[in-house]
């Protein structure tokens, strides 16, 4: 399977604009060229520090400037995170993603505590992913040394549309953090959000940015906006399943080796709609009742869906030569 990083915008648009059934068929064909295409990775996302963020991301209920019903919670204790990790393992998760509502990582006692969390969860056999905002190369190195496996930092939308959604940091800031993550040899998790009011051209441009990086992101989350009362996007319409299918299928075709994550918005999808997403190339989900602060299907519902669709769970660190624990040894 040829993995290209020289995609032209016009090529991606041509794929994205295919008749939907043709597009899904082609994505399914590409997906089946991957080993174990029926495997789906289960990740659990924990909000380790909630609310009070000084950013102005228009979709986010955790921004301090918006009047939402999100309760602000300080950084969790290490023991509480270990409890959540134990629950995640019991429910079949192989990756724990820890998210903090920060603009950027700061070198302080909170970061020291997160490094301890990372080390403890890594020792439990889970892939550890963090999403903490912007970070420097040195901070990425510290996360890596502590046992962090992956770092999530989404670009959200096209560079042209970015300023309509966020003004407190730039698109280039996002790219700089991703470069720091890649330089530190952490697995890169980077995708975007559908339903922000963007055009189809914005969606194609976002996919173009991802697919023309020097190395494709290891994981590409495709999120559907979950409008939250009190945020600027509270009245945005629900994202239709055909829009999600186009994004997932196109991502699968142009980034054939990446994990494509069916992320936020899954709570509003039927099993049949999710099945189409898996057929189109999605091979990872976030499971658990909350996705940071928005509703998500619970583990039992997901396990029932897996049984119906004949899906199996992907083991942690599959395809990795050395796990973080082995590197540290």
Image (cartoon, helix red, strand yellow):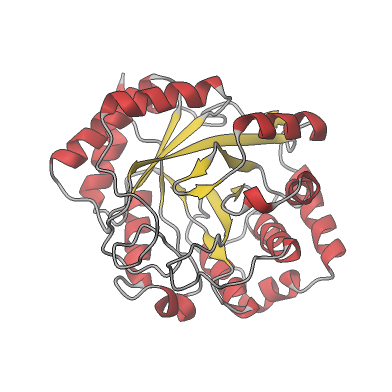
Q: Residue at x 27, y 59 (%)?
A: 103
Q: Residue at x 49, y 55 (%)?
A: 215
Horizontal relation, residue 4 to residue 168: left or right: right
Q: Is residue 56 above or below residue 27?
A: below
Residue 263 lies, in percent from the top left, at 58, 50
Residue 92 lies, in percent from the top left, at 58, 25
Would residue 323 be visible to someone looking at this image?
Answer: no
* Quadrant of residue 239 within the rendered picture: bottom right
Horizontal relation, residue 139 to residue 127: left or right: left
Q: Residue at x 81, y 47 (%)?
A: 272
* Quadrant of residue 196 within the rendered picture: bottom right
Q: Quadrant of the C terminus?
A: top left
Horizontal relation, residue 244 to residue 177: left or right: right
Instruction: Depth check: give the residue in front, 257 or 312.
Output: 312
Q: Is residue 294 above or below residue 125?
A: below
Q: Is residue 326 above or below residue 318?
A: above
Horizontal relation, residue 263 to residue 329: left or right: right
Q: Residue at x 55, y 73 (%)?
A: 235
Residue 57 lies, in percent from the top left, at 39, 67
């Amino acid at each position: 399977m040829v993995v290209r990083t020289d995609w032209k915008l016009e090529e991606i648009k041509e794929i994205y604009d295919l008749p939907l059934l043709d597009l899904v068929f082609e994505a399914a064909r590409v997906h089946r060229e991957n080993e174990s295409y029926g495997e789906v990775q289960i990740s659990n996302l924990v909000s380790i520090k909630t609310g009070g963020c000084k950013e102005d991301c228009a979709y986010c209920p955790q921004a301090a400037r918006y009047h939402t019903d999100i309760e602000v919670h300080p950084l969790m204790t290490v023991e509480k995170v270990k409890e959540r990790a134990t629950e995640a393992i019991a429910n079949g998760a192989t990756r724990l993603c820890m998210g903090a509502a920060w603009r950027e990582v700061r070198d302080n006692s909170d970061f020291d505590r997160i490094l301890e969390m990372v080390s403890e969860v890594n020792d439990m056999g889970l892939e550890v992913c963090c999403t903490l905002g912007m970070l420097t190369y040195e901070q990425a190195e510290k996360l890596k040394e502590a046992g962090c496996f992956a770092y999530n930092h989404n670009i959200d939308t096209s560079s042209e549309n970015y300023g309509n959604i966020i003004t407190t940091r730039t698109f280039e800031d996002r790219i700089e953090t991703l470069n720091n993550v890649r330089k530190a040899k952490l697995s890169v998790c980077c995708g975007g959000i559908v339903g922000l009011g963007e055009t189809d051209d914005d969606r194609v441009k976002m996919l173009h940015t991802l697919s023309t990086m020097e190395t494709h992101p290891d994981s590409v989350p495709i999120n559907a906006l979950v409008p939250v009362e009190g945020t600027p996007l509270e009245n945005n319409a629900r994202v239709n399943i055909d829009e999600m299918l186009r994004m997932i299928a196109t991502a699968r075709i142009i980034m054939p080796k990446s994990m494509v994550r069916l992320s936020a918005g899954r709570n509003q999808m039927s099993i049949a709609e999710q099945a189409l997403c898996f057929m189109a190339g999605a091979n990872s989900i976030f499971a658990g009742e909350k996705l940071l602060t928005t509703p998500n299907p619970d583990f039992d519902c997901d396990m029932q869906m897996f049984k119906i669709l004949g899906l199996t769970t992907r083991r942690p660190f599959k395809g990795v030569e050395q796990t973080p624990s082995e590197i540290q040894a």
